[in-house]
Image (cartoon, rainbow, N blue to C red):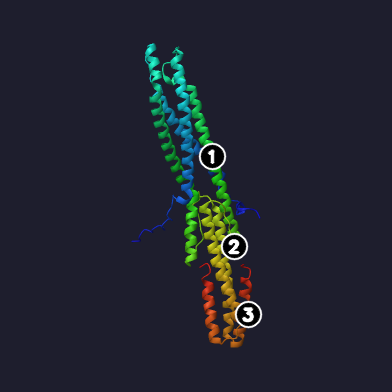
Amino acid sequence: MSGPEAAGDVPLIHRRYVIGLLLRLFVNFAGGVGILFVILYFALSRPLPGDYAGVFHALRNLSPFFRAILSVSVLLYALLACGSTSALCVYILHKVAGPLHRMDLILDQYRSGAHTRTVSFRHDDQLQPLAKTFNLWIGTLHRDRHRWLSTMMDAERHCLQDEATCRAEMEEALREVAGDMARYR
Amino acid sequence: MKAPSVPPPRPRIRYVNPRFQGPAVLAFAAIIVTGGAIFWKLVDREFQQVFLHAAIQGHYEFDSAYDIVRDLLAWHLASLFVGVFLTGSVLILLLVAATRHGIGKTVDSLRRSADGDLSTSTGTGFIGEFDRFGEKIDAARSDTLASVLKIRGDAAALAASGISPEEFRLRWDELKHRIRRIAP
C-alpha cells in the first residue's frame, strides 16, 4: 500500500499551500505586533518635562497611565490579530473545507439515488486525490453495472429462440452476475 | 436571431464550514489571547520597576519614557511575535497532519471500495469533521454493499428457482431495474 498520495502522485495538501499559509500567518502576526509597537511608541515617546522635578514626577506618575495604555493596546492587538487570523482561516482553509462540502453534497446525492456524476474540484483546491479515488470507485461501479446489464441483455437475445434455451441462458446469466458480484464484500 | 448561449451555473462556493474552520479559529484566538496576556503581565511588571528605578536614579539622560524601555520593549515584542508565530505554526502543521491522516484514510477507503471492499471501516481519526465525513463515506459504501448483496442473493435464488416463466420474467425485469439503480 502506498498511501493516499500515490493516487496520480498528487499530494492531498501541497507543500506550497502550507508554506503560503505559514507566510500569511507570519505577516499577520508581524502586523499585529507592529500595531502594538506603534501604540506603545506613541504613548511612551512624549517628551518628559525639562526640569529635574518634572521628570521625577512624570516617571513616578507614569505607572497608572502606562497600565491603562498597555491594557488598551494589548486588547486592540488581540482583537485585530484574532480578527485577521479568523479571516485568514476562512480564506485559506476553504480550499480544504470547500472540497469537503462538495463531497458532502455528492454523497447526499449518491445516497438519495440521484444520478451521480464525476466529481471535480477547483484547480487550486486541496484534497484532489479524494475526487480521483471517488471517481475511480464510481467508475468501477458504473463499469460493473454495465457489464451485469450486458450479460442479462445478451441472455435475453436467446428468447428469440425457443423458450427452454431462453430460460437456460437467463439462468446462466443470473449465475454469472451473482458470481461477478461476489467480489463485493 | 440566435439567442446568446447561457453559461452553465457554476457550483456555489462555500467558504465557511464551522465544524472545520471554527475550531481552528478558536485555537488561534486562544494562542493570541494567551500570548497577549503573558505579554501584558510581563511588560506591566517589568516596566513599572524600570520606571521607578529610573525615577529614583536621578541621572535623567533620556528625552522620553520610550528611551528608557526601548530595548526591553523590543525584546518583549519580539518574544510575543516569536511565541505566537511558532505556536500558530505548530497548530497549522498539526492541522495539516490531521487533514492528511483523516482524508488519507478516506482516500484509502475509496480505493479499497474500487477493489470491491465495501465493508472495512474508514476510521478517519480524531478530528470531528473528518470523522463525520468518514462515516458518511462508510454509509454510502454500506448502502452500495447492501444493494449488491441483495441483488446477488436474489439473482442466485432466481437462477435456482423453478418458478413459472411469467413469474420468472417479472422477477428478471425487477432485478434489471434494481441493477440500473446501483450508482445511477
Chain containing mark 1: B
The amino acid pointed to by label 2 is Ser
The amino acid pointed to by label 3 is Glu
Chain containing mark 3: A
| Residue A111 appearing in the image | yes
Q: Residues within 10 Å of mark 1 (few under 14, many from 20)?
A: some
Chain containing mark 2: B
Q: Are marks 2 and 3 on the same chain?
A: no
Helix, strand, or loop for circle 2? helix
- On residue A172, which mark appears? 3
Instruction: Report how far apart the C-alphas of labels 2 and 3 lie in the structure.
Output: 27 Å
- Residue under circle 1? B89
Instruction: Report how far apart the C-alphas of labels 2 and 1 lie in the structure.
Output: 35 Å
Asked if B105 appears above or below A175 in the picture, the reply is above
List x then y, in percent, for residue B171: 54, 81
Q: Are marks 1 and 3 on the same chain?
A: no
Front residue of this view, candidates B33 and B85: B33
Are the two marked residues, 1 and 3, in contact with CB atoms closer than 8 angstroms?
no
Reading the chain from its start, which is encountered first: label 2 or label 1?
Answer: 1
Q: Residue at x 47, y 66 (%)?
A: A112
